[in-house]
Image (tube, grey):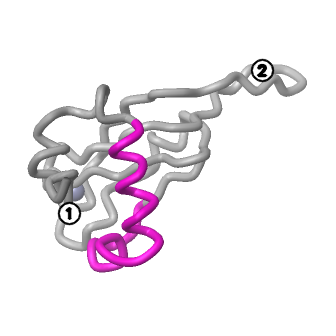
Amino acid sequence: MKRWLMDILACPASDCRSELNLEVYTSHNLETEDEVVEEIDEALIRCPKCGRWYPVIDGIACMLPDDLRKEGKQYREETAFLEKWKENIPTDILKNGIPFGLTEQ
Ligand SMILES: [Zn+2]
């Protein structure tokens, strides 16, 4: 995802819609004809209002409703993301993340 996307993204929770914070873990520069755009590969998106977190995985911001994140393939991918970046992800997310953390392990 492009870094400037953060300027227009809002928290998808229906009772929230807050602006979001971004912590980039890996990115690369994409050179176009007249500018260099930062393309974010892996990052943590945090909502300062409701406390939810969202992952950016392989350049895609995964911003699904809680109930779709807590099961199946999506849950496994997002848990793998937490595991991969646990040295960087704030402890409060790992322990008590919304909608989940890494507590089961
Ligand atoms: Zn929110």
Residue in the image at 50% along x and 52% along y? 61
Which segment is the magenta one? 63-84
Taking the magenta stretch, the answer to whether it contains residue 74 is: yes
In what quadrant of the picture does the N terminus appear? top right
Residue annotated with mark 1: 99
Identify which residue, 5 or 69, lies in the foreground: 69
Cβ–Cβ below 8 Å for labels 1 and 2? no
What's the residue type where badge 1 is placed? Pro
Q: Is residue 90 above or below residue 66?
A: above
Residue 78 position within the rendered picture, expressed as x and y whole percent measured from the top left: 39, 57
**Quarter location, residue 23:** top left
Q: Is residue 21 left or right of residue 55?
A: left
Residue in the image at 20% along x and 32% along y? 90
Residue 69 position within the rendered picture, expressed as x and y whole percent measured from the top left: 34, 70
Identify which residue, 66 or 20, lies in the foreground: 66
Residue 60 position within the rendered picture, expressed as x and y whole percent measured from the top left: 57, 52
Point out the quarter of the image occupied by ligand 1: bottom left
What's the residue type where badge 2 is placed? Glu
Q: Magenta part mainly helix, strand or loop? A: helix
**Quarter location, residue 35:** top right
Label 1: element kind: loop
Identify the disc placed on residue 35. Answer: 2
